[in-house]
Amino acid sequence: MAKRIALECSHAISLAVKLANVDVIAAYPITPQTHIVERLSEYVADGELDAEYINVESEHSAMSACIGASAVGARCFTATAGQGLALMHEMLFIAAGNRLPIVMAVANRCLSPNLSIWGDQSDMMASKDCGWIQMYGENAQEVFDLTLQAFRIAEDERVLLPVAVNFDGFYVTHVIESLTVLEQEEVNRFLPPRRKAKYTLHPDNPTTWGPIGLPDIQTELKYQLEKAIQNSKKVIKEVWREYGEISGRYYDVFEPYRLEDAEVAILMMGGHCGTARIAVDRLREKGLKVGLIKLRLFRPFPFEELVEATKHLKALAVVDKAFSPGGFGGPIFSEVRSAFYDLDVKPRIVGFIAGLGGRDIRVDEFMGLAEKVLRGEKIEKNYVFLQVRE
């Protein structure tokens, strides 16, 4: 029988990793993810988890250790945030390009300047094109579930790609919430030990991986990576469906809220979706037909599913907690506009950049942006920084 407990979200991730029976954990501390690897170190030290716990000298080394361990067939995990993810940047491409099923928890944190330990999504968005599957969770339950699912997805022979499970620094990581935990036997049935990989590093049969990509092979290498990540969406949906049959909690590429009859919807990822739901409810009380789309899967991006779910809308208000300096608004906004580019009939798409550096997005701010879109107010370039003080 499933057990319901209260647990800090960071420790919920640690518990999921423990239940996944990982072989190798490579760890380097950085706020706000440190609680994850601290708790895992306790599990290993106390004999509750039989795993190799590697204390490395940097996040670059943490990913390097995971790459080596995964290449010999081990189930691997690491966690990071902000500048730590930026320091890993080089190795993220190597993990994806070598098709290594590593799972990484990312406690999303603002990148400098100035030094900020608070949560927005600029760290993962700076690495959005590294070839990793990327999922975003809202709360402890969701992040616990996504972590278990990530191992199953990553290690599927049809996928063999690394997976990043993202969640808001502090707003999610340091909050104690209720959590329904699967029993070890249930996890074992859902997530058996990693299958022996077809290609592995072994001292008895030495091989060389990725020494140089000459011009006559590099295009093909990048193309097979693109095919792999696009084809992974089918497997992701299969895994989510099977997990739902075990847990009663079903996941999809996005989660709609009061969307059926909505004229305008707010679309965003992560922990502020809970606040946005309150805003939607209050707008409904005022007679305004507003809904919410919580985007869960960012890579591969669910273009077709999003178009189908929103074809009845008059407008979409896309909220990004990151932006592309010198580009066109936020990363989610750009993807959403691309999804509708070739369509003759499409909703008006307006972008809002908010929550940078961990700034709270209040209920009244969500209500205000939705009302602005409902009124059809002209917005220059179709995106705006919402919380800038004049």
Image: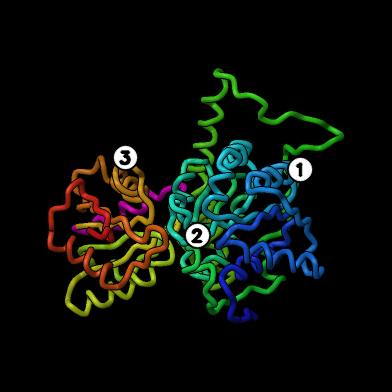
Report the magenta residues as a range: 299-314
Q: Relative to 23, is 88 above or below? A: above
Q: Quadrant of the C terminus?
A: bottom left
**Marks 2 & 3, CB-CB < 8 Å contact:** no
The amino acid pointed to by label 2 is Ile
Disc number for residue 72: 1
The amino acid pointed to by label 3 is Gly
Q: Relative to 200, is 255 above or below? A: below
- Could you tell me which residue is drawn at 20 percent across and 64 percent down? 263
Q: Secondary structure at mark 3?
A: loop
Q: Secondary structure at mark 2?
A: loop
- Could you tell me which residue is drawn at 31 percent across and 54 percent down? 308
* 354 relative to 141 in the view: left or right: left
Near-viewer residue (239 or 374): 374
Near-viewer residue (293 or 122): 122
Whichever of labels 1 and 2 marks the residue nearer the N terminus, that label is 1
Q: Which residue is mark 3?
A: 326
Mark 2 against mark 3, which lies toward the viewer? 2
Q: Position of residue 370 (x, y in %)?
A: 22, 65
Near-viewer residue (249 or 273): 273
Mark 1 against mark 3, which lies toward the viewer? 3
Disc number for residue 117: 2
Q: Position of residue 260 (x, y in %)?
A: 27, 67
